[in-house]
Each structure stands twice: as structure tokens, then as C-alpha cells.
Image (tube, rainbow, N blue to C red):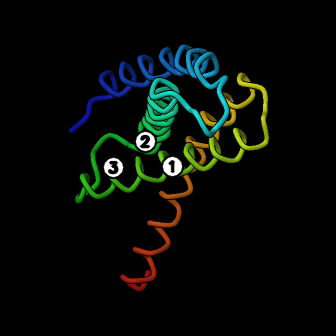
Amino acid sequence: MISRTSLAALKLVVYLLWPATAWATQITIGQTLADVPLLAWLMVFILSTVSGLAALLNSLKLELPKRWPIFIGAHMLGSWLAGTMIFFGLEGAETADLLEALAIGLGSYAGARLMDKWSEMFVNKVTGK
């Protein structure tokens, strides 16, 4: 069981990391897609992870789902996929780095939430609810 205090502390840490990672990501994404440095890929991954964790903590209640590893894995994969796709699209469009970092963060959060909705619809369809 997850206590309310522990969940609140985790949310606070993630929300404090979010702006810092967004700022650090926009600094490192200045290159074109053809020669994206390893540090930029790392920052996209970190920003997508922090955004996905924020969405995950918002979706968790006081206890974990029965198959929590699958739930968390699908949730984070949705976040990483959305962040990477947004990175590719905006890098190819030569968008400003700060705007790109903000879009990756928000898109990763939304991608994780979308994955939750899809998985819930799938479970309801399979179980007949």
C-alpha cells in the first residue's frame, strides 16, 4: 500500500524535477536531427521519463493495480514514444529549443495518459464491462 504522504512526497519531487529537466533539455537540443548529440537524446529520455512519472503518480491512487509492472511499463512506454515522436517532428521543423522542450514534456505527459485510457478501454472490452 502506498500512503498519502509517500505519494505526495513523490509528486513533489517529480514536479520539482520537471521544470529543471525541461530547461536542461532545451539547452541541449540546439543541433539538427542529423547530428543530435548523445546528451540531447539523454535529455529527451529524461524529460519524457519525468513527465511520464508525473502522469503515473497522478493516475495512481492509494494502492497499485494488480498487475502493476505491466501498468507501469505500458504507461512509461507511452510517455517515451510520445516524447520521441514529438522530438523528431519538432527537430525536423527546426522549432525553437525551449518550445521543443516544453512540447516534449507536455506531449510525454499526455502520451502516458493516453496509454492509460487505451489500456482501460482494452481491459473493459476484454472483460465485458
Name which of mark 3 and mark 1 comes first in the sequence: 3
Q: Residue at x 48, y 57 (%)?
A: 116
Kindly identify which residue carries mark 3. 72
* Residue 112, disc: 1
Q: Splitting the image into 4 quarters, where does residue 125 fall?
A: bottom left
Q: Residue at x 39, y 43 (%)?
A: 60
Kindly identify which residue carries mark 2. 56
- Give the number of the mark in front: 2 or 1: 1
Q: Residue at x 60, y 33 (%)?
A: 105
What whole-number distance in Å separates the C-alpha atoms at marks 3 and 2? 7 Å
Name which of mark 2 and mark 1 comes first in the sequence: 2
Count every numbered label the image shows and give the total: 3
**Residue 100 locus on image (x, y percent):** 70, 31
Q: Is residue 127 above or below residue 26?
A: below
**Residue 42 locus on image (x, y percent):** 44, 29
Which amino acid type is marked by label 3? Ile
Whether residues under marks 2 and 1 lie with C-beta atoms below 8 angstroms apart, the answer is yes
The kind of secondary structure element at disc 2 is helix
Whether residues under marks 3 and 2 lie with C-beta atoms below 8 angstroms apart, the answer is yes
Q: Is residue 41 above or below residue 23?
A: below
Question: Quadrant where the N terminus lies?
Answer: top left
What whole-number distance in Å separates the C-alpha atoms at marks 3 and 1? 10 Å
76 or 129, nearer to the observer: 76
Name which of mark 3 and mark 2 comes first in the sequence: 2
Q: Is residue 52 left or right of residue 35?
A: left
Q: Is residue 60 left or right of residue 115?
A: left
Whether residues under marks 3 and 1 lie with C-beta atoms below 8 angstroms apart, the answer is no
What whole-number distance in Å separates the C-alpha atoms at marks 2 and 1? 7 Å
Which amino acid type is marked by label 1? Ala
